[in-house]
Image: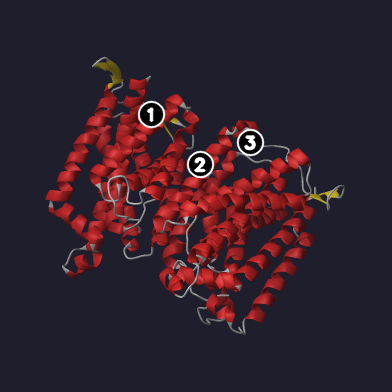
Amino acid sequence: MAMTGVNVHGSYIYANPRHGLRAAGFAVLVIALAAAPLVAGDYQLHALIVSMTFLLPALGLNLILGYAGMLSFAQMAFFGIGAYSSALTAMRWGTPFWLNLVVGGLAAGIVAVPLGIPALRLRRYSFVMCTLGFAVIAQTIAKNWISVTRGDLGLSQVPRPRIALWNGGFEITSITSYYYLALVLSVLAVLAFLTLVSSAAGRYMIAIREDETLAASVGTPTWHYRMIAFALSAVFAGVGGSFYVHYFTVISPTVFDPFYANTVLVIVLGGGVGTVGGVVLGSFLFVAVSEALRIAPDLRMIAYGLLLIVIVFACPEGLLPLFIRKIRFGGGTHVP
Amino acid sequence: MLTDAVVNGITAGSVYALVAVGMTIIFGVLRAINFAHGEFYMLGTFGAWWGIETLDLPYIVSIPLALIIVAAIALAVGVLVMKRLIDQPFQIGIVATLGVSLVLQNVIILIFGGAYKMFDGGWIEPVEILGISLSEQRILIVVAALVIFGLLELMVHRTRFGKTIRAVSQNIEACKVVGVNVPVVVIGTFVLGCTLAALSGVLTAPVTVSLYGGMGTSITVKTFAIIVMGGVGNVSGTLFAAWILGLMESFVASYLGLQFRDAVAFTALIVVLTLLPGGLFSKRERF
C-alpha cells in the first residue's frame, strides 16, 4: 500500500499533539506568501500564481487518489470544463468573478456525476483507463463543438476577474492583485480540503481506500462516498480551471493534453499523496523545478520522467516525509 | 468508398493488433499497464528512419536494425524499471511506466528535434487485387500480422517459454515455488512485447509517412482500448478487437469526419467496460 501512503489521518480523530504544530506551519507559510510581493518581482509572482493554479486540481486528485484510493486521469478534463464554462459565462453575461468560480466548479461537479455512474463501477485499471477516456473525449468535444468553443482556436479575450457582488466593482489587472486573489483562493481551498478530510465523509473515504469490502461490511455506503469523492475532486479542478482562464484570459483544447495531467500527477505523487502539506509542497516544487529547467526546456520533460520513476521506487510517499524528517531530526515516519 | 474504408480499417487494425498483443502479454505476466508501450512503436519507426537516412541502408535492412535497437532499449528498461514492478501495487506500475514514456519520448525529441520527419522507404507501389487497388506495404502489414499472430499462438501454447508466460500470468507465487525465474520471464516478455510494437511501427511507417517524437501517445491509448475489448492475455481476441477498432475508426473517419476518429477508441472502451467488463470474447472480468 505504499502508493496510498501511510494511514495517518486515522489519528486525526483523536486529540493530536501535532495539530498545533501543523496549524502554526500553515500560518507561517501563509504569512510568508502574503509578504512575498514585497520582495518578489513580477516574474516570481507569476510563477507562484501558476503553482497555486495547479494546487486546486492537485488537491482534487489528492482527494480521489490519496483518500478514496482511485487513480483518476479525468482531473484535467474537469479543469477544462470549469475553465470553458466559466469563460463562456463571463463572456456572455459579464458575470462577477465569484459567480464564475461557482459556475466553473458546479459545471465540473455536475458533469462528474453521470460520468461517475459507469466509471465508479470499475476498479483499478479499468477505472484509470475510463477516466483517461474522459479526457480524450473532452478534448474531442472542445475541438469540434466549434459554435461554442471555437475549436482549435480556443477562446480568447476572456474577461478579467471582476470583484463585485453583482454590478460595478473593480477588475483585477495588476499581477500583485492576481497574486493575492490566487492566495486567498488557495487558502480557502486548503481549508475546505482539511475540513472535508477530517469530517466523517473523509474518514469514510479513508476506510474505503484501506479496505472497501471491510468498509462495506460495517455499513459504510461505499458507492455514495466514492461518488462524493469523485464529484468533489471535479469541483476542485473546475474552480482551478475557472481561475486559470480568468488569469491567462485564453483557453484552447490543449488544456486537455496529457502534459497537464502528468503535471498534476507529478505534483501529488512528488509532494506526498494522501497529505495536504505534500500537495502544497509539490505545487511549489513543481514550479521551482520547471523554472530551474527553463534554461533547458528540452530537458524538462525528461527530468519529469526520471523524477516520476525515482519517486515511485525510492520515496513512494513523496518528498514531504523527507522534509519533515529533516526538520524533526530523524523523528518518526508519520506525516502531517 | 466502402471498400476503401474496409481496407483502411483492416490495415490500421493489423497495426494496432501488433502493438496491442505485446501489451497484453506484458500485462499478463506483470499485472501492469505499460504506459510507455506506444513509445516502443515510435522508437521502431525512428530506428528504421535513422537507418535509412543516416546509414543509407535499404528499408529491408533497416527493419532488423530497428528491431535490434528497440530490443536493446527494452532490455535496459526491463532490467532497470519493469523488474522492480513485480508484486507492486498497480499505481506504481502506471506512474513508473508513465515516467519511462516521458523519458523515451523526450530523449528522441532532444536527439532528433521535435519537427515532423518524412519516412522514405518501403513498397508503396499500388497493385490491383480483386478489383481493389492497394499498396504492397498494406498487404505486407496484414500478412505480417496474420503470420505473427499464428506464431504467437503456437509459442504461447506449445513452447516452454510460452508455457512459462502463461504460468506466471496465472499464479506468480506458485511459479516462484516451483523454481521459475520470474524476473527473467518478466524481462523476456517485456522485450518480446516491445519488439512487436517496434515491428508494427517499422511496417506502418511507409504508409503513415510522417514521424515525430510524440507519435506514440495516441497509439498507447488506443492499445488500452483494444486489450480491454479483446480480453487481457487473449492473443486471438486481441487481433479481432484490433480489427474491430480499426474498422470502426475507418468508418467514422470516412462517414462522420476525420476529427472524430480518435474519440472512437475510448467511446468503445467505456461502452465495453460498462456492459462487458470481461471484454468481447470472455465473460470473466480480468482487470
In the picture, the disc for residue A137 is 2
Image location (x, y in percent) of residue B139: 25, 26
Q: Is residue A249 left or right of residue B218?
A: right
Q: Quick one: SS at disc 2?
A: helix
Q: Mark 1 — residue?
A: B208
Q: Chain of mark 1?
A: B
Q: Quadrant of residue B146?
A: top left
Q: Is residue B251 left or right of residue B18?
A: right
Q: Quick one: SS at disc 3?
A: helix
Q: CB under 8 Å between callouts 3 and 1?
A: no
Crowd tier of the residue under label 2, counting other residues whose Cα lies within 10 Å: few below 14, some 14–19, many 20 or above: many
Q: CA distance from mark 3 to mark 1?
A: 30 Å
Q: CB under 8 Å between callouts 1 and 2?
A: no
Crowd tier of the residue under label 1, counting other residues whose Cα lies within 10 Å: few below 14, some 14–19, many 20 or above: few
Image location (x, y in percent) of residue A184: 74, 61
The N terminus of chain B lies in which quarter of the figure? top left
Three-letter residue code for mark 1:
Thr
Image location (x, y in percent) of residue B247: 35, 31
- Camera-side residue of A119 and A151: A119
Q: How is the image coloured?
A: secondary structure
Residue B225 position (above or below residue A12): above
Q: Mark 3 — residue?
A: A149
